[in-house]
Amino acid sequence: MKEHIFLASPHMSEEGFEQEFIQEAFDTNWIAPLGKNVTEFEKEMSGFLGAKAAVALSSGTAAIHMALKSAGVRQGDLVFCQDLTFSATANPILYEKATPVFIDSEPESWNMSPKALELAFEKYDKMGKRPKAVLAVHLYGLCAKIQEIAALCKKYEVPLVEDAAESLGTTCQGRYTGTFGDYGIISFNGNKIITTSGGGMLLVNTEDAKERAAKVLYWATQAREPARWYQHTEIGYNYRMSNIVAGIGRGQLKVLDKRVGKKREIYQYYQDHLGDLPGISFMPMQDGARSNCWLTAIQLEEGCQVKPLDIMEALEKDDVESRPVWKPMHLQPVFSGCDFITQVEGVCLTEPVTGADSSIGGQIFQHGVCLPSDTKMKEEDLERICRVIRALWQPDAAKE
Ligand SMILES: *Cc1c(COP(=O)(O)O)cnc(C)c1O
């Protein structure tokens, strides 16, 4: 019997670090929200990454929501948001009844195009409008052109939020993603590079990071005023991470470097064993960046004999999980009517079934597949996956 291979599944430390932190919480009855694991996890993570302050929250989505709120995003405001991403990046903009403007990607990083971002600033400047925040993503652990994006945000005096949900451990010029923007967010969802079963963290990197983090902590714990009785002057949320969950996170942080090493080996393995197939290419690695390779994503060029769906179906038949690349936000019915800024002229529909178009993000979506990138995979698992994929290029050899 062949074993099921996951796209990316939770991988607890071999040493049992997570259990030790959880046991300590049980022994001291620090089960309920506040406790040592939460504050220590924040300190350890911000220390490791080099962020000025951190707030542990119930999810990455909650962290994005709090970042936008802290940046001053309110009803009717504009937020310039990366278009090619998971919907969790964009949804919190709508929680605050603000308006997203989606910004296309560029081919070298697959992330927000600094040129398209500049076009967006210019277009809205002419109307006398400026966004309250820019929300950029480091997709699949690939570093965005974050220094160029940050420079533009500085020029227009707009706060930058980095969605580093998928890129924990990725560095750009030796500095961790999530520490370039005014805010960074991390996710510890089950399929991310390290997981707490579910959770997230907000990083704050501004001069007044401590005050901003304190305000987020207040919103995230029901906005209780420091009074003897229950007093509220603002709407609050129940977004705080629990002490048990934080214990898992502290244990997982100890193996982050190891997980990044393994993810990078997986990427390298695929490149070595599939790279010669005609029409296949790999997600781009930029000079000066070291990706955590959260998922290895490939592209099958237009006219390639094998289509992304062929790979997904062949792997599924072999009980192996793979996924399409994120479908861009401007192609999502829920965001129809939102503005979309791209450098591509005359964007047109290219794939009637999925609705992909000729924008950069649309093309990455149309031609992309995410290959299994589970850190628990053994060499024989990778061999099996590559055999299934290679057979699609040599249909006769596969029948032997
Ligand atoms: C996973 C993810 C999120 C959301 O994180 P949760 O912890 O699941 O809420 C946000 N953005 C991106 C790009 C993600 O991949």
Image: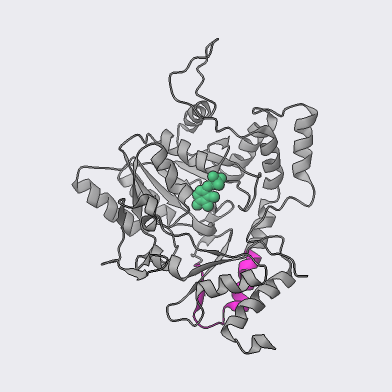
Instruction: Answer whether residue 164 is visible to the viewer in this image.
Output: no
In the depicted structure, whether residue 240 falls above or below residue 121:
above
Q: Position of residue 62 (x, y in %)?
A: 51, 39
Asked if the stretch drawn in magenta spans residue 274, the answer is yes
In the depicted structure, whether residue 160 falls above or below residue 346:
above
Q: Nearer the viewer, residue 112 or 303?
A: 303
Q: Position of residue 30 (x, y in %)?
A: 72, 27
Instruction: Answer whether residue 397 is visible to the viewer in this image.
Output: yes
> Going 40% across and 42% down the picture, which residue do you hit?
93
Q: Position of residue 204 (x, y in %)?
A: 49, 38
Q: Nearer the viewer, residue 161 or 83?
A: 83
* Rendering quarter of residue 76: top left
Q: Nearer the viewer, residue 43 or 236?
A: 236
Q: Name the image quarter holding the N terminus.
A: bottom right
> Going 36% across and 71% down the picture, which residue do you hit?
350
Region in magenta: 264-284
In the depicted structure, whether residue 258 falls above or below residue 45:
below
Asked if the stretch drawn in magenta spans residue 12, the answer is no
Q: Position of residue 247 (x, y in %)?
A: 70, 38
